[in-house]
Image (cartoon, rainbow, N blue to C red):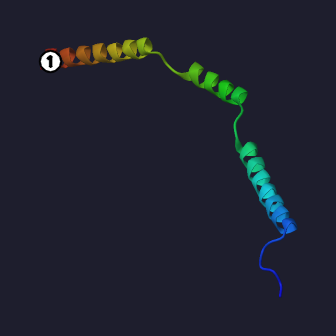
């Protein structure tokens, strides 16, 4: 009567197959990951393109001033 219990070799083969599968998954993850240097470089590019709060405040003030002048001009015509 054959034994239904797995042999030591069966267990080792299963562990080896699982380890190989996990290694492949790690390779896939590593190939898609961004390195710290790449992330820092992209963040630096992003920071250089950002405008400051002071810049936005100045632009909004300019827009507001232009609108006030336009309304006053229109009211003077009326």
Res. 55 image quadrant: top left
Q: Is residue 6 above or below residue 69?
A: below
Which residue appears at 77% of the width and 59% of the height?
18
Q: Secondary structure at mark 1?
A: helix
Which residue appears at 25% of the width and 13% of the height?
69
Relative image position of residue 9 (x, y in whole percent): 87, 66
Q: Residues within 10 Å of mark 1 (few under 14, many from 20)?
A: few
Relative image position of residue 44 (x, y in whole percent): 63, 21
Which residue appears at 81% of the width and 56% of the height?
20
Which quadrant of the figure contains the N terminus? bottom right
Q: Out of 15 and 60, give the one closest to the viewer.
A: 15
Residue 40 as seen in the image, left or right of residue 74: right
Q: Out of 24 and 57, give the one closest to the viewer.
A: 24
Res. 49 image quadrant: top right
Which residue appears at 81% of the width and 62% of the height?
17
Q: Is residue 59 above or below residue 40?
A: above
Question: Label 1 belongs to which residue?
Answer: 75
Relative image position of residue 46 (x, y in whole percent): 59, 25
């Amino acid at each position: 009567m054959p034994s239904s219990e797995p042999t030591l070799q069966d267990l080792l083969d299963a562990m080896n197959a699982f380890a190989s599968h996990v290694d492949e998954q790690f390779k896939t993850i590593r190939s898609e990951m961004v390195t710290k240097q790449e992330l820092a470089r992209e963040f630096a590019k992003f920071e250089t393109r950002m405008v400051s709060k002071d810049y936005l405040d100045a632009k909004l003030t300019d827009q507001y001033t232009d609108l006030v002048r336009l309304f006053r001009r229109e009211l003077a015509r009326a």
